[in-house]
Image (cartoon, rainbow, N blue to C red):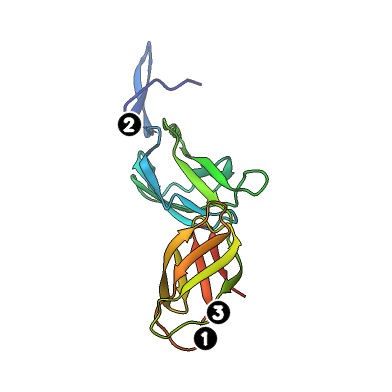
Amino acid sequence: TVTTPAFADGPATVCITASGGTAAAAEQFTFEGTPVISANGISPNQGPTTGGTPVTITGSNFPAGDPNVTVSFGGANATAVNVENSTTILANTPPSPLPGSGAGPVNVTVTDIGGTSSNNPPITFTYIIAPTVSGISPTSGPTQGGETVIIKGTNLCNATNVMFGSASAAITNITSDCTTITVTEPPGTGTVPVVVMTPGGSARSP
């Protein structure tokens, strides 16, 4: 029984030397470098607290095809981890391990036989609470668009888009308490759903 010495990445021949001579093992021993996540190496870097966000992690020293690689989000393991090559890992985020609402940043690490990644500053993924929409005012406007519409709800600060049916409205203001969005109605006809979209999920107005 031996303890491996430090060695460069890659395969090494294992030899035993005794007074009667030297013998080489038939198998080689492969040294794996510690995985490294690149700065800004997770995309997207935010998603809903419920998990399930497909992310791409880029870096180096990832063992391609290794089924034993784990990706941790604040101590919770990602699912559907697939090491595509030595620089790319695909995975789905787990539900947020944070207490309370589950919102906030968590450290992301990759662990394989070479060890656990250690970035300074840490690589983070931010969990975001899903929005809710309680209503809109007014509920009608001209077909050519241009009407100012107030949307009420919760967790609206991270809104990336507001859809009136298949048309995107222009967001002109979001209040600091995340309860109100002001948009400019796009052109359209008929009655359409109004949906607020955020990295934490989407919510449709009742």
* Nearest to N terminus: mark 1 or mark 3: 3
Give, as a three-letter code, the residue at label 3: Thr
Labels 2, 3: front one: 3
Camera-nearest residue between 1 and 156: 156
Alpha-carbon span between mark 2 and mark 3: 64 Å
Q: Give the vertical position of 69 relative to 32 (above or below).
A: below
Marks 1,3: beta carbons within 8 A: no
* Nearest to N terminus: mark 2 or mark 3: 2
Residue beneath disc 3: 139
Whether residue 189 is visible here, answered yes or no, is: yes
> Could you say where residue 166 lies in the image, as x and y percent from the top left?
43, 78
Residue 141: which disc?
none
> What element does badge 3 sit on?
loop
Give, as a three-letter code, the residue at label 2: Asp
Residue beneath disc 1: 191
Camera-nearest residue between 78 and 154: 154
> Could you say where residue 175 lies in the image, as x and y percent from the top left?
52, 55
20 relative to 205 in the view: left or right: left
Q: Quadrant of residue 152?
A: bottom right
Give, as a three-letter code, the residue at label 1: Thr
> What element does badge 1 sit on?
loop
> What element does badge 2 sit on?
loop
Alpha-carbon span between mark 2 and mark 1: 62 Å
> Could you say where residue 174 lies in the image, as x and y percent from the top left?
49, 58
Q: Quadrant of residue 63?
A: top left
Residue 9: which disc?
2
- Residue drawn at x 50%, y 72% as measured from the top left: 149
